[in-house]
Image (cartoon, grey):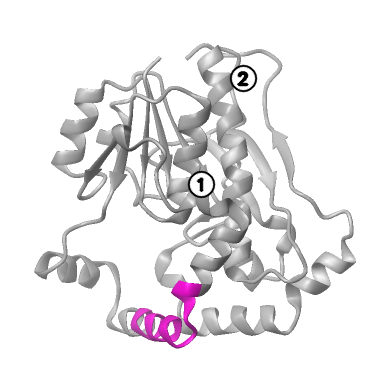
């Protein structure tokens, strides 16, 4: 069975790629390096955001610089994921970079890899033409608890909503419907009292990587069950533009004032849990 991973190139992406490549044989790892900059990028942003939303996103970037977020993110990544697993790809011979996961370049590469299974983690929305290249199934690792939190920044919104029990990850079928395919496993992240927003994200990634490995191993071995359809009438789909400067400041203040600490102290049994959602019989892919 030919298994191909599509991912990005940051700490969490490299960690998940390394865990998967160490556990199962991958035919290739396609790394989305993002769309090219310049005028085309500005046009994309103009279509995606209103002028007010673009201003809010710019304010977020300025706040991140002021708060030294890049250094804090790297520190927490190394602390939680381990520097050895998140700073570099372990299998560089498997890596091919593309500009845009849905680009012609990406399509041509994936066609040459002839995937039976496509694994997706942390990219832009993968469109139907790309997903159709998987001869058996496409899977996605979502750092949120579906169907309750779907879409973008689903480690962020449970903190915003004071709903920390909904921090974790989901492995589901990757379809044209955002985070809407059949669920194969769900896990809740293990939090610690001194966690910040970056810690929370990487704990969701760590939990998700474990789930992903288990699901893919079951799939390759022919023992993966049929999964559970999602009830999309519950929960909410969050879009990137919704995380504006006001929401970001609110979450930073909540964490600074002890939201995560109070939750952990009030839930001494807080720990990462795995909840595979499977039917009794297995399904062949």
Numbered-mark total? 2
Picture coordinates of residue 137 (x, y %)? 42, 24
Secondary structure under tag 2 reads loop
Frontmost residue, 19 versus 191: 19
- Residue sticking out furthest to the left: 39
Secondary structure under tag 1 reads helix
Picture coordinates of residue 179 (x, y %)? 49, 45
Picture coordinates of residue 140 (x, y %)? 47, 39
Residue depicted at x 61% and y 29% = 214
Residue that mark 2 sits on:
225
Query: Is residue 210 found left or right of 24 in the rendered image?
Result: right
Frontmost residue, 101 versus 19: 19
Q: Does the magenta stretch include residue 227?
A: no
Task: Tell me the chief SS of the magenta region.
Answer: helix
**Marker disc for residue 85:** 1
Residue depicted at x 20% and y 50% = 99
Visible residue check, residue 64 = yes
**Residue span colored magenta:** 57-71
Query: Is residue 78 found left or right of 130 in the rendered image?
Result: right
For residue 64, above or below residue 226: below
Residue depicted at x 24% and y 69% = 45
Q: Does the magenta stretch include residue 67?
A: yes
């Amino acid at each position: 069975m030919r298994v191909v991973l599509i991912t990005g190139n940051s700490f969490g992406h490299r960690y998940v790629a390394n865990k998967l490549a160490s556990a199962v044989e991958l035919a290739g790892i396609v790394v989305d390096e993002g769309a090219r900059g310049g005028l085309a990028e500005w046009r994309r942003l103009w279509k995606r955001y209103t002028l007010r939303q673009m201003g809010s996103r710019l304010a977020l970037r300025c706040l991140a610089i002021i708060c030294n977020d890049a250094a804090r993110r790297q520190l927490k990544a190394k602390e939680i994921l381990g520097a050895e697993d998140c700073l570099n790809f372990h299998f560089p011979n498997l890596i091919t970079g593309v500009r845009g996961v849905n680009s012609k370049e990406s399509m041509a590469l994936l066609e040459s890899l002839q995937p039976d299974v496509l694994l997706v983690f942390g990219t832009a929305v993968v469109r139907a033409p790309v997903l159709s290249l998987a001869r058996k199934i496409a899977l996605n690792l979502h750092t949120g608890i579906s169907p309750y939190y779907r879409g973008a920044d689903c480690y962020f919104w449970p903190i915003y909503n004071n709903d920390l029990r909904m921090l974790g990850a989901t492995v589901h079928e990757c379809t044209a419907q955002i985070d809407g395919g059949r669920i194969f496993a769900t896990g809740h992240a293990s939090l610690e009292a001194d966690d910040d927003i970056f810690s929370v994200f990487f704990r969701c990634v760590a939990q998700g990587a474990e789930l992903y490995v288990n699901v893919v191993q079951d799939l390759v071995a022919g023992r993966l069950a049929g999964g559970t359809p999602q009830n999309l009438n519950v929960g909410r789909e969050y879009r990137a533009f919704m995380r504006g400067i006001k929401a970001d400041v609110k979450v930073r203040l909540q964490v600074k004032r002890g939201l995560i600490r109070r939750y952990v102290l009030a839930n001494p049994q807080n720990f990462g849990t795995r909840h595979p959602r499977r039917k009794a019989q297995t399904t062949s892919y």
